[in-house]
Image (spheres, rainbow, N blue to C red):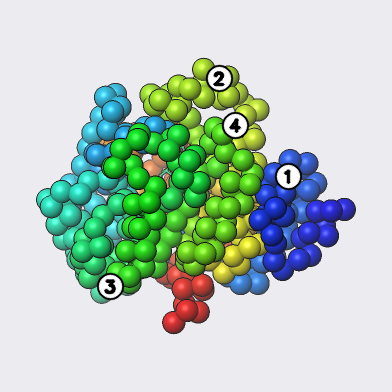
């Protein structure tokens, strides 16, 4: 009863959002997803947009305690994709009418890396006369670097805050200036000033994280007035300090994974309800926890999918967490699987369109 009452509202307090995020009863969750889907239908339409994901390098200067490509993981085999291979993938995306590509890599701040990315952006912009949208995801940089990337043709940038709670942030990162919560927040403002459509997001189901933390994450997104959200459940990687801890505590059982999946879906739905017209990605991590994870993410209010384009040779090395799906599949098979997910959810793929967030367009 209480849930149905709550879902009739247009705005929610942080406590109410926490209550919705914490729902576990099957029927309650279904009601939550249905309400969120109705908001998506009203503000975005029944569309899902593709961003071809090119994970071009796993070399990283950071040491985040949860991440499989952290600097300290000596088992991770490092790679940098060749410029020609990246361009080939971007061309593939264009030829198959993906509206946009997302370029993602580990974090580096050295000049050779920055000029490599800059050159890449310029080359990708030449494909189809600039018709391919570009989202960039290469971490914390100076404002000048962000401006160079924007100049070169990227127009969206995704930088997850991971959690809006600085204390929780400090438990999942090393304690040094390279891993400062405040710097990450500053970067989000730098990106906005540089002209980007800005996206951020979090991981749900982190050890020590509460439903209230997650509700406050949504308030953080709202206060920052972001255009896009990319978030997903935390998934264990066993060669990381956090992954080991979670396994030791017996918190990586099927049941716990199910809880993290549920939380990931509830977060998508609660964010859709609260923020209405932003783009919300249905991330690969959802599918790592369940084969139908992405379809459910669309039903819970997500509208962006990121089919992986990374060449097979490197895909297995870009391992942020375990059970990364579609390891053996070709780009075409991945495309077909995602189209099927979209159709099962009752949506249509917005082929050939950028699919910018209505939130961003409305601000202009
Ligand atoms: N589980 C889920 N998401 C992860 N990320 C990194 N490691 C993990 C993990 N073990 C996410 C972070 C980062 C994004 C690129 O991947 O949120 O910002």
Q: Nearer the viewer, residue 297 or 250?
A: 250
Q: Position of residue 9 (x, y in %)?
A: 76, 66
Quadrant location, ligand no. 1: top left
Q: Position of residue 240 (x, y in %)?
A: 39, 26
| Circle 3 Cα neighbour tier, 10 Å, few/some/many (<14 / 14–19 / ≥20) | few
Report if residue 96 is visible in the image: no
- State the residue lying farthest toward the bottom: 364
Q: Are marks 2 and 4 in contact (CB under 8 Å)?
A: no
Q: Are marks 2 and 3 in contact (CB under 8 Å)?
A: no
Determine if the C-beta at disc 3 is less than 8 A from ligand 1: no
Q: Which residue is mark 4?
A: 257
Q: How many marks?
A: 4
The residue lying at 27 percent from left, 45 percent from top is 107
Which one is earlier in the sequence, the residue at label 1 or at label 2?
Answer: 1
Label 2 secondary element: loop
The residue lying at 48 percent from left, 41 percent from top is 167
Which one is earlier in the sequence, the residue at label 4 or at label 1?
Answer: 1
The residue lying at 73 percent from left, 44 percent from top is 23
Which one is earlier in the sequence, the residue at label 1 or at label 3?
Answer: 1
Q: Which mark is residue 23?
A: 1
Q: Nearer the viewer, residue 281 or 20?
A: 20
Spatial CA distance of label 1 from label 3 is: 44 Å
Label 1 secondary element: loop
Q: Which mark is residue 130?
A: 3
Q: Which residue is mark 2?
A: 249
Q: Nearer the viewer, mark 4 or mark 3?
A: 4
| Circle 2 Cα neighbour tier, 10 Å, few/some/many (<14 / 14–19 / ≥20) | few
Spatial CA distance of label 4 from label 1 is: 16 Å
Report if residue 108 is visible in the image: yes
């Amino acid at each position: 009863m209480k849930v149905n009452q709550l879902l009739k509202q247009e705005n929610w307090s942080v406590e109410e959002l926490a209550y919705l995020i914490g729902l576990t009863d099957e029927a309650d969750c279904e009601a939550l997803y249905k309400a969120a889907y109705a908001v998506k239908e009203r503000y975005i339409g029944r569309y899902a947009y593709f961003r071809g994901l090119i994970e071009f390098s796993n070399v990283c200067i950071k040491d985040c305690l949860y991440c499989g490509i952290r600097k300290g993981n000596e088992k991770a085999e490092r790679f940098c994709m060749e410029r020609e291979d990246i361009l080939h993938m971007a061309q593939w995306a264009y030829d198959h009418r993906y509206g946009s590509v997302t370029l993602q890599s580990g974090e580096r701040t050295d000049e050779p890396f920055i000029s490599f990315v800059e050159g890449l952006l310029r080359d990708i912009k030449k494909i189809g006369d600039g018709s391919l949208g570009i989202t960039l995801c290469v971490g914390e940089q100076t404002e000048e670097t962000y401006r160079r990337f924007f100049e070169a043709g990227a127009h969206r940038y995704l930088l997850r805050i991971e959690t809006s709670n600085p204390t929780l942030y400090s438990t999942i990162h090393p304690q040094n200036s390279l891993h400062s919560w405040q710097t990450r927040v500053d970067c989000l403002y730098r990106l906005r000033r540089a002209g980007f459509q800005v996206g951020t997001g979090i991981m749900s189901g982190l050890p020590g994280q509460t439903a209230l933390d997650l509700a406050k994450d949504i308030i953080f997104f709202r206060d920052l007035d972001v255009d896009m959200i990319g978030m997903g459940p935390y998934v264990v990687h066993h060669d990381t300090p956090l992954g080991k801890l979670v396994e030791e505590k017996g918190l990586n059982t099927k049941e716990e994974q199910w809880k993290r999946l549920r939380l990931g879906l509830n977060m998508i739905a609660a964010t859709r309800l609260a923020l209405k017209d932003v783009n919300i990605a249905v991330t690969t991590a959802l599918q790592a926890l369940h084969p139908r994870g992405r379809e459910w993410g669309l039903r819970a209010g997500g509208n962006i999918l990121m089919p992986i384009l990374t060449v097979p040779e490197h895909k297995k090395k870009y391992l942020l967490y375990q059970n990364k799906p579609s390891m053996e599949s070709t780009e075409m098979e991945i495309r077909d699987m995602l189209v099927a997910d979209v159709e099962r959810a009752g949506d249509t793929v917005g082929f050939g369109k950028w699919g910018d967030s209505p939130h961003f367009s409305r601000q202009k």
